[in-house]
């Protein structure tokens, strides 16, 4: 018999690491669907999803991902039922209080993006503490999008630039793409290379709209609480197979 090549998880992981994305972002969708399918409360789906967050952070460290961004709570989520909002806020508090020391020990740097001026002090103080404690860490850069909406982010960035124009610091014709990028919450972060959305939905949902201009998208038909490392590797494998040209032709990319 001829040689048989067995495609193991280790082989898949090695292939993914050969062309890994620098920055992976997740739209963690499907907690409610997961709970409904099991006759559980939506809040139970969120609790299960929080456990998966811990695993994905750990897996990202193992996979040597430099930047991981998680869409944890959108600015539109405040319109959900009060008990669900309270559950989500409670999970965030628990994540920071329970996991901050471990993340710090593992050299993870935490950064929070999103509107802060309307947050209650107990939540805001926790977010600031997480950033301050880990500010000098040089490992995985974990960005948590909380009270975040991409349109709101763009509005705030434009307002900031307009203020600079009014103050005479810059002229309107000096505003460029890099100026806008620098005015966004993600200033200093590389744009996401790969955005993964779970639950089978295929939309951006007001997430990183400016930054996602040349991101690759992978949509998985798995609800977030069921997301496993094999799904992560599947998405990374799909990314590795993509031909990323950033608007250029093959010949011009080859010359760079």
Image (spheres, rainbow, N blue to C red):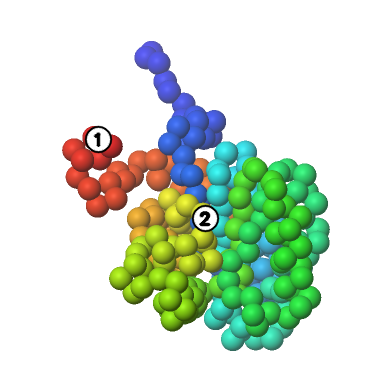
Q: How many marks?
A: 2
At 43% from the left and 50% from the top, the residue drawn is 193
How far apart marks 1 and 2 lie (CA) works out to: 27 Å
Residue at label 1?
254
Percent position (x, y) of residue 25?
51, 56
Report which quarter residue 177 is drawn in. bottom left
Q: Earlier in the sequence, mark 1 or mark 2?
A: 2
Q: Quadrant of the N terminus?
A: top left
Vertical arrangement, residue 246 with respect to residue 179, above or below: above
Residue at label 2?
188
Percent position (x, y) of residue 241?
35, 41
Disc 2 is placed on an element classified as loop
Q: Quadrant of the C terminus?
A: top left
Disc 1 is placed on an element classified as helix
Vertical arrangement, residue 202 with respect to residue 140, above or below: below
Judging depth in this view, the residue of 194 and 252 nearest the camera is 252
At 65% from the left and 43% from the top, the residue drawn is 138
At 72% from the left and 52% from the top, the residue drawn is 134
Q: Is residue 103 left or right of residue 21?
A: right
Judging depth in this view, the residue of 42 and 63 nearest the camera is 63
Q: Nearer the viewer, mark 1 or mark 2?
A: 2
Is residue 205 visible from the viewing direction of this image? no
Percent position (x, y) of residue 184?
49, 67
* Residues at circles 1 and 2 in contact by the CB criterion of under 8 Å: no
């Amino acid at each position: 018999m001829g040689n048989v090549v067995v495609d193991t998880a280790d082989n898949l992981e090695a292939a993914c690491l050969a062309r890994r994305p620098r920055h992976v972002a997740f739209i963690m969708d499907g907690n409610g669907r997961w709970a409904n399918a099991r006759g559980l409360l939506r809040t139970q789906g969120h609790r299960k999803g929080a456990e998966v967050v811990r695993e994905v952070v750990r897996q990202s460290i193992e996979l040597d991902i430099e930047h991981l961004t998680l869409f944890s709570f959108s600015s539109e989520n405040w319109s959900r039922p009060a008990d669900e909002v309270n559950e989500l806020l409670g999970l965030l508090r628990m994540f920071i209080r329970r996991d901050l020391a471990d993340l710090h020990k593992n050299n993870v740097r935490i950064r929070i993006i999103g509107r802060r001026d309307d947050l209650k002090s107990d939540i805001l103080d926790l977010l600031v503490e997480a950033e301050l404690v880990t500010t000098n860490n040089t490992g995985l850069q974990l960005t948590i999008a909380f009270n975040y909406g991409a349109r709101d982010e763009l509005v705030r960035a434009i307002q900031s630039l307009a203020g600079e124009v009014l103050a005479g610091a810059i002229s309107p014709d000096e505003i460029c793409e890099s100026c806008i990028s620098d005015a966004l919450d993600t200033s200093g972060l590389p744009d996401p290379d790969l955005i993964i959305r779970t639950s089978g939905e295929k939309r951006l949902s007001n997430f990183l709209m400016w930054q996602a201009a040349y991101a690759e998208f992978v949509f998985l038909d798995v609800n977030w609480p069921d997301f496993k490392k094999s799904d992560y590797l599947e998405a990374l494998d799909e990314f590795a197979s993509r031909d990323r040209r950033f608007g250029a032709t093959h010949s011009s990319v080859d010359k760079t």
